[in-house]
Image: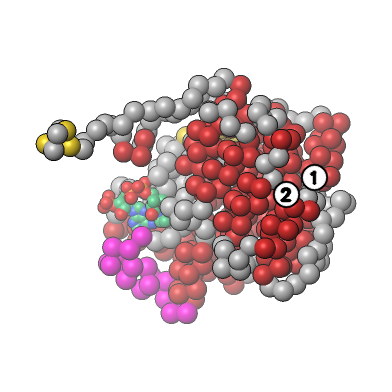
């Protein structure tokens, strides 16, 4: 028995590959650092179709993603009737679930995947503004997927640097192998349930802090260091108290997380000299040195969340939107996996080892 199925291969996939020893993440044969120059729509197409789009195919994909941005009236009614103390991930789970009309019946299609991908940013923006007592800003047809998301949140067209920063983060987090939420989506799809049910399962799984744990912990760490003004002292104290440093270490990567490297490069290119980024770089240097001292040989480096925190900060994204924004990108990976599962389906049905009683005696 392997607790948590650690190390167990649960499916074959042609969507992505993670080499934890070499620090590589590959989408459909392309290393992640090669993909940063593309936009969200291009990389989403690659993940769904297994190849880059021709100009005509890309135009069609962009049109599909744009025309599906509006929410049906019944979804708006549900959104506005949800209690204010419902968190955004629960809102997403509920509204996505309510979008499951017969249009989404088995078998899943790329067109269904695009529809769900289109409405997630609209749901997030609608809910965010609604809970703040602000009027909803309808999606715009002339903006890209990422531009439109920021526009619907703030009501102003974002500048290209903000778009690029968020787009980099989203591209780097579109897909990541057999993580818990992707596994959830595939298990649900394996019963030949519909795509909406599979994605609803995935959102529920993503909500848990052990998985969708947002970069807020990193922001707290950097804020604390900024306040005290002595990174080494703060970090030593945490390590002395056997605390984990947020934004460091990874279950799979036993070297640098390639997404962290790519995000840092994006930030250096877009933001350049900046107080917050300078602090993050200084903290990274000191923390890596101290982690080697306290945990020799464990190879602990920054993970994707470390520089994601700086990206979120640079675009002024509210921390309550970190995990929902992660969801807005990971929907592409989930739907690609459901499509793959449907193509060669076997229902998931592992076994359990009984450790209960037998006629009141322990087995
Ligand atoms: N700070 C201090 N020590 C650490 C850290 C850290 N961030 N990460 C691992 N270690 C230590 C562990 O205490 C352990 O020490 P030991 O061998 O003396 O017991 C050793 O390094 C190995 O760590 P594990 O816990 O076995 O590593 P695991 O692969 O199980 O955990 C995890 C990975 C959960 C990400 C861990 O590194 C951690 O908690 N990091 C901080 C939280 C964080 O940044 N999470 C985001 C991850 S990225 C993502 O989910 C998208």
Q: In x, y percent, where is residue 47? A: 66, 33
Cα–Cα gap, marks 1 and 2: 7 Å
- Colouring rule applied to residues: secondary structure
Answer left or right for 342 relative to 148: left
Please state the extent of the stretch shown in magenta in the rendering. Answer: 227-244
What residue is drawn where x is 48% and y is 56%?
213
> Where residue 261 is drawn, which disc sits there?
none
> Where residue 119 is drawn, which disc sits there?
2
Answer left or right for 31 relative to 135: left
What residue is drawn where x is 38% and y is 28%?
350
Q: In x, y percent, where is residue 14? A: 57, 26
Image-quadrant location for residue 15: top right
- The answer to whether one can see residue 46 in this image is no
Residue denoted by label 1: 68
Q: Main secondary structure of the magenta part?
A: helix
Graded by Cα atoms within 10 Å as few (under 14), some (14 to 19) or many (20 or more), the crowding at tag 2 reads many
What residue is drawn where x is 43% and y is 79%?
228
């Amino acid at each position: 028995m392997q607790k948590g199925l650690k190390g167990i291969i649960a499916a074959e996939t042609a969507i992505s590959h993670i080499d934890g020893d070499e620090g590589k993440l590959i989408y459909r044969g392309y290393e992640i650092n090669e993909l940063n120059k593309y936009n969200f729509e291009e990389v989403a197409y690659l993940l769904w179709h297994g190849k880059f789009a021709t100009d005509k195919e890309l135009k069609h994909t962009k049109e599909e993603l744009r025309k599906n941005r509006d929410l049906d009236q019944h979804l708006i009614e549900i959104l506005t009737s949800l209690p204010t103390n419902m968190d955004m991930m629960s809102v997403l789970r509920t509204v996505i679930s309510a979008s499951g009309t017969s249009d989404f019946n088995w078998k899943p299609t790329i067109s269904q995947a695009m529809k769900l991908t289109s409405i997630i940013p609209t749901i997030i923006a609608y809910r965010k503004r609604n809970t703040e007592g602000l009027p909803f800003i309808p999606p715009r047809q002339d903006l890209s997927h990422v531009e439109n998301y920021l526009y619907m949140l703030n009501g102003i067209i974002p500048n290209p640097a903000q778009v690029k920063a968020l787009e980099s983060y989203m591209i780097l987090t579109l897909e990541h192998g057999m993580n818990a939420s992707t596994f959830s989506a595939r298990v649900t799809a394996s019963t030949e349930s519909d795509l909406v049910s599979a994605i609803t399962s995935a959102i529920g799984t993503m909500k848990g802090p052990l998985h969708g744990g947002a970069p807020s912990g990193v922001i707290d760490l950097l804020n604390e260091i900024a306040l005290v003004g002595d990174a080494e002292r703060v970090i030593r104290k945490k390590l002395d108290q056997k605390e984990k440093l947020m934004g460091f270490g990874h279950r799979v990567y036993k070297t640098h997380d390639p997404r962290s490297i790519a995000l840092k490069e994006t930030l250096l290119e877009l933001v350049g000299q900046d107080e917050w980024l300078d602090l993050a770089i200084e903290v990274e240097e000191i923390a890596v040195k101290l982690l080697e001292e306290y945990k020799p040989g464990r190879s602990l480096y920054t993970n994707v969340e470390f520089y994601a925190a700086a990206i979120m900060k640079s675009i002024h994204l509210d921390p309550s939107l970190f995990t929902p924004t992660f969801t807005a990108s990971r929907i592409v990976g989930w739907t690609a996996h459901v499509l793959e599962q449907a193509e060669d389906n076997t229902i998931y049905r592992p076994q359990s080892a009984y450790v209960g009683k037998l006629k009141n005696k322990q087995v």
